[in-house]
Image: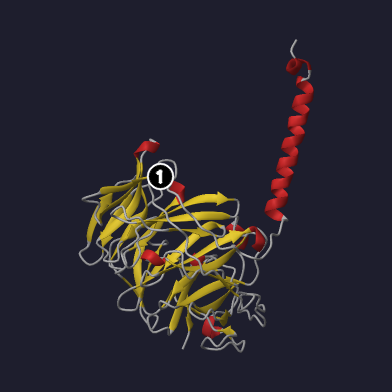
Amino acid sequence: MNIFSRYKKYFLIILFLALIFLLGYLLWRVFFFTSPQNVPVQTATGTINGLPSSNLGSNLTDLTGGNGTLPGNEGEQLDDNGNPLTGAGKNTGASEIALGGLTQTNILSKSPASNPVLSSDNNVKYYNKSDGIFYTVDSNGNISPISDKVFYNASNVVWAPDANKAIIEYPDGNKILYNFSTKKQTTLPAYWEDFSFSPGSDQIISKSIGLDPENRWLMVSNDDGSEARTIEAIGTNADKVYPSWSPNQQIIAMYTRGVDFDRQEVFFVGQNDENFKSTIIEGRGFQSQWSKDGEKLLYSVYHTRDDLKPRLWIVSANGDNIGQNRKSFNIQTWADKCTFATNTEIYCAVPESLEKGAGLFPELADSTKDNLFKIDLESGTQKLIAIPDNNYNISQIIVDENQESLYFTDKSTGFLYEINLK
């Protein structure tokens, strides 16, 4: 009998204890460990899956203009049925325009308004899940259907930048492109996913997900699916690839690779095998949004030093400037709860409070009350502009071109609301 067989029981006990210790350490690391606040500037080199990378830009700045902790909603009034009054029906002393305090919130739709978008005529377009019809809302709050065609039970809508066409997705995987100007409908392959339109609204980038990992690609085609061509093989890394066409047309997608527990490397993909730089981001849970000119990238990530809560960052993402001028803001929210009003100004919905681990488990914030901030990306100024007059969990923010009105949907009801900025 060899030594292993004789002491097999003891080896197994030791291995079991080691696993218990490792799991305990990982739980402590995720939920209780707080690392130092100094964020080092990193340098990244190397190549992954054929996606080029180069040295990381520097100039990391931490802007600390506010703490995101705001007073609650006081003086809530109810109607005769015990329901909260909304907007003009309230008598709480709320301001009619956003002045940094309690602000009247006007309801525009009394049915779910999914995937709202600002159109070229400065109106808001959205899909109504209740009746399957697309509508537009003008500056006076008047609602009218865009088309008489009904799209029942759509699960997602991806608008083109011109808001005259959209890719409509269904729970069974079917997808169509519908042009509201020409009233033409085109069926897209069901195995295409995660669409992003080109700035000219005439092309799309998507992920083609075949059953075999060797047949999974990042690809570009015309908006109707014709003239499709592959860009990069993505294999088993589809969940780390983000199709996102930049407004300046340089970048069509991003790819992330884990560096360690708290950091990722972001690679930028072009259409013609460009050797773009990569950059290191301080966190996980990457969400991003392009500035209007495509020069900057707003993103949010969570980090152990923030108790795994999301934090907003901005970084240059154009040509040789990729990775430069990176700044973090003392704003704990997600990038998809923000919108660019100009190239240097953004509006964000910020939770009044977030539980530890909310970045890792976003559902922890599904019922959190949000307030509205305006951030100047050049100076770093973070200004509370409005405390909505009800407990809204804000999503899908839109600001009109003149910054007179801010529109948003409430996650609990799906209704569309408006706040007057001026």
Q: Is residue 186 left or right of residue 23?
A: left
Total label count?
1
Quarter occupied by residue 390: bottom right
Q: Is residue 211 something one can see in this rendering?
A: no
- Vertical placement of residue 402 versus 368, above or below: below
Q: Is residue 35 something one can see in this rendering?
A: yes
Q: Nearer the viewer, residue 407 or 127?
A: 407
Give how far across and how far down residue 269 sits, in percent: 36, 55
Q: Nearer the viewer, residue 45 or 232?
A: 45
Give how far across and how far down residue 91 sits, in percent: 60, 87
Give how far across and how far down residue 183 sits, in percent: 22, 62
The residue positioned 37% from the left and 79% from the top of the image is: 142
- Vertical placement of residue 212 versus 90, above or below: above
Give how far across and how far down residue 93 sits, in percent: 61, 89
Q: Is residue 201 left or right of residue 7?
A: left
> What colour-coding does the image apply?
secondary structure
Quarter occupied by residue 361: bottom right
Which secondary structure, mark 1?
Answer: loop
Q: Is residue 391 left or right of residue 322?
A: right
The residue positioned 67% from the left and 52% from the top of the image is: 30
Which residue is the site of mark 1? Answer: 49
Q: Please rate how many residues cluster around mark 1, counting C-alpha atoms within 10 Å: few if below 14, some from 14 to 19, many from 20.
A: few
The residue positioned 41% from the left and 76% from the top of the image is: 343
User: In the rendered image, which quarter contains the N terminus?
Assistant: top right
